[in-house]
């Protein structure tokens, strides 16, 4: 079948049985799972259920310590930076939590013209970004889906000063296989789609009308994307709609399904939490709110469960919470974001935005903060550009070899940022971090890094290994 609907085995009965069977694990069970996690080969459904039941502060400390260790081993100090680019807030769906829902009269509707998309891209490039996430509601202007394809072409066509967008990821509604093939031909990076909730009854209750009301069409979108040749697919849950433990186990089932069917799981997992949104009572009063403590726990468990899958944290969260989750497993963050179409040119406007932000800082401030904490803000896009995607990426990543690419590339792209866009204070912080990082590298990594850095200092851009 060209466009299979659901063959994704999200089994609610198994999830509920597993959670109730392992609701009160003893310390030995928890220690066994943590020991397994440190082998960095991932965890299964029962393991994840055990970790999700930890409440003892000491054991929680051990969970966080294990997550920190795995994060450090695989991702080192790197944090990949990106900016969302909202091209349109037109939408035909009625998702009760979202400001863009069709019946919401409190939001101004706008689909950017290609010239406006180019202008937004210029502003984002001038901030220093190299990656964007193109986002749209599920209704396109007259030209239909080709509006999104044109937008991607526009984004890649912008060359401004010494920069350009080198990887455009996309978060749009589920597509047919033919449409996914067009998206692949447009040279997107990751196709991202969040199931929002894996719990069918909740899904039905919060998606009242429009195409998105079809759970199966949405849950099978990653399958269609991968079958159409898109190697890097990102999935996620909108936390706050249903019990987070259930969602976590369902996410694991989805990941296992993709791994067994395609030999590779998702490239990234996103973990948005419900934020207030204009015209949505549900967004201000999440049915199943996730506390900050549980949210940290979630990051740590996902890090241990799928060690090689990127975890994305957006500016929905406050700077403080974002900082804490870097150590626990987050590998990509957005910064300097706007969630209203035209927001980079016009500023943040809540009556245009999808939801309100927790972090309002500029990219420069976020970069300085991250660097002061000892993390290297990475603007690297090299894997995707040399074809290290999907299974090829995982094959390099799994034995830990990716460090030999990522660390030098992170440093050279960070230096590009510092030389071309940073404020003096950020440049000073960043240059010190680069010196300290080089000192702590092994000789091979250092020599590769130094040679890239030398090229950037002498005026080359977009150099990578
Ligand atoms: N319209 C497409 C769709 O729904 O798949 C793609 C873009 S949608 C604008 C991106 C994501 O924003 C949604 O998948 C949802 O998880 C998230 N979102 C919607 N309302 C939100 C809210 N109030 N707080 C946080 N995230 C929200
Ligand atoms: Fe539309 Fe996506 Fe918002 Fe739902 S989440 S109302 S589909 S933009």
Image: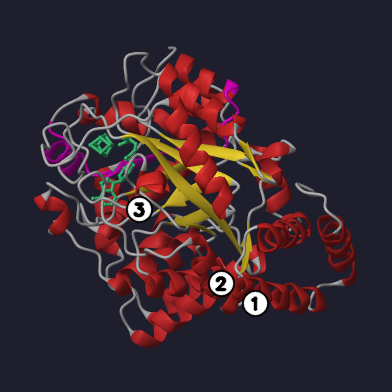
Whether the magenta-drawn stretch holds residue 186 is answered as: yes
Q: Using residue 348 as the reference point, say whether residue 43 is left or right of it.
A: right
Residue segment shown in magenta:
185-208
Label 3 or label 1, whichever comes before in sequence order: 3
Q: Nearer the viewer, residue 331 or 48?
A: 331
Residue on which the image places disc 1: 429
Residue on which the image places disc 2: 368
Residue 128: give x, y in percent of width and height. Answer: 59, 53
* Quarter of the N terminus within the rendering: top left
Q: Name the front one of labels 3 and 1.
A: 1
Figure check: 407 above or below 167: below
Residue 175: give x, y in percent of width and height. Answer: 39, 23
Whether the magenta-drawn stretch holds residue 231 is answered as: no
* Marking on residue 249: 3
Q: Residue at x 58, y 67 (%)?
A: 71
Instruction: Tell whether label 1 touches label 2 (CB within 8 Å).
Output: yes
Tell me how far mark 3 sits from mark 1, CA to CA: 41 Å
Q: Nearer the viewer, residue 4 or 334?
A: 334
Q: Nearer the viewer, residue 444 or 49?
A: 444
Q: How does the figure colour the protein chain or chains? A: secondary structure
Tell me how far mark 2 sits from mark 1, CA to CA: 7 Å
Q: Residue at x 40, y 87 (%)?
A: 58
SS category of the residue bearing label 1: helix
Q: Residues within 10 Å of mark 1 (few under 14, many from 20)?
A: some
Q: Name the front one of labels 3 and 2.
A: 2
Q: Residue at x 33, y 49 (%)?
A: 237
Which quarter of the frame holds ligand 1?
top left
């Amino acid at each position: 079948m060209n466009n299979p609907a659901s063959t994704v085995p999200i089994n609610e009965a198994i999830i509920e049985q597993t959670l109730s069977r392992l609701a009160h694990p003893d310390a030995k069970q928890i220690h066994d799972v943590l020991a397994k996690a440190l082998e960095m080969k991932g965890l299964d459904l029962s393991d994840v259920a055990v970790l999700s039941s930890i409440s003892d502060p000491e054991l929680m400390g051990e969970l966080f310590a294990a997550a920190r260790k795995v994060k450090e081993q695989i991702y080192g100090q790197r944090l990949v930076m990106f900016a969302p680019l909202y091209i349109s807030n037109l939408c035909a769906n009625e998702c009760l939590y979202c400001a863009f829902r069709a019946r919401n009269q409190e939001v101004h509707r706008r689909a950017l013209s290609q010239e406006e998309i180019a202008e937004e891209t210029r502003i984002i490039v001038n901030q220093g970004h190299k990656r964007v996430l193109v986002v749209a509601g599920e209704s396109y202007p007259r030209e239909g889906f080709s509006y999104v394809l044109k937008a991607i072409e526009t984004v890649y066509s912008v060359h401004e000063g010494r920069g350009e967008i080198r990887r455009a990821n996309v978060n749009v509604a589920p597509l047919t296989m033919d449409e996914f093939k067009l998206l692949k031909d447009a040279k997107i990076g990751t196709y991202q789609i969040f199931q929002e909730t894996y719990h069918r009854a909740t899904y039905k209750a919060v998606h009242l009308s429009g195409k998105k009301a079809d759970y199966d069409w949405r849950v099978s979108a990653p399958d269609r994307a991968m079958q159409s040749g898109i190697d890097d697919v990102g999935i996620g849950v909108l936390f706050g709609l249903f019990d987070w433990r259930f969602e976590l186990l369902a996410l694991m089932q989805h990941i296992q399904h993709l791994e067994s069917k395609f030999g590779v799981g998702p490239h990234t997992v996103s973990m948005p939490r419900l934020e207030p949104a204009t015209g949505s009572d549900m967004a201000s009063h999440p049915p199943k709110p996730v506390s900050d403590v549980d949210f940290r726990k979630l990051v740590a468990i996902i890090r241990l469960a799928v060690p090689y899958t990127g975890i994305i944290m957006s500016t929905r969260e406050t700077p403080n919470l974002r900082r804490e989750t870097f150590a626990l497993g987050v590998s990509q963050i957005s910064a300097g974001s706007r969630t209203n179409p035209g927001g980079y040119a016009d500023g943040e406007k809540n009556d245009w935005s999808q939801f309100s932000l927790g972090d309002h800082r500029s990219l420069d401030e976020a970069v300085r903060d991250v660097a002061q904490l000892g993390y290297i803000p990475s603007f690297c896009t090299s894997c995707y550009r040399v074809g290290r995607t999907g299974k090829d990426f995982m094959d390099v990543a799994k034995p830990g070899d990716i460090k030999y690419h990522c660390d030098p590339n992170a440093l050279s792209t960070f230096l590009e940022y510092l030389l071309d866009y940073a404020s003096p204070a950020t440049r000073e912080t960043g240059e010190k971090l680069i010196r300290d990082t080089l000192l702590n590298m092994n000789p091979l990594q250092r020599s590769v890094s130094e040679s890239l850095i030398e090229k950037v200092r002498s005026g080359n851009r977009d150099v990578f290994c």
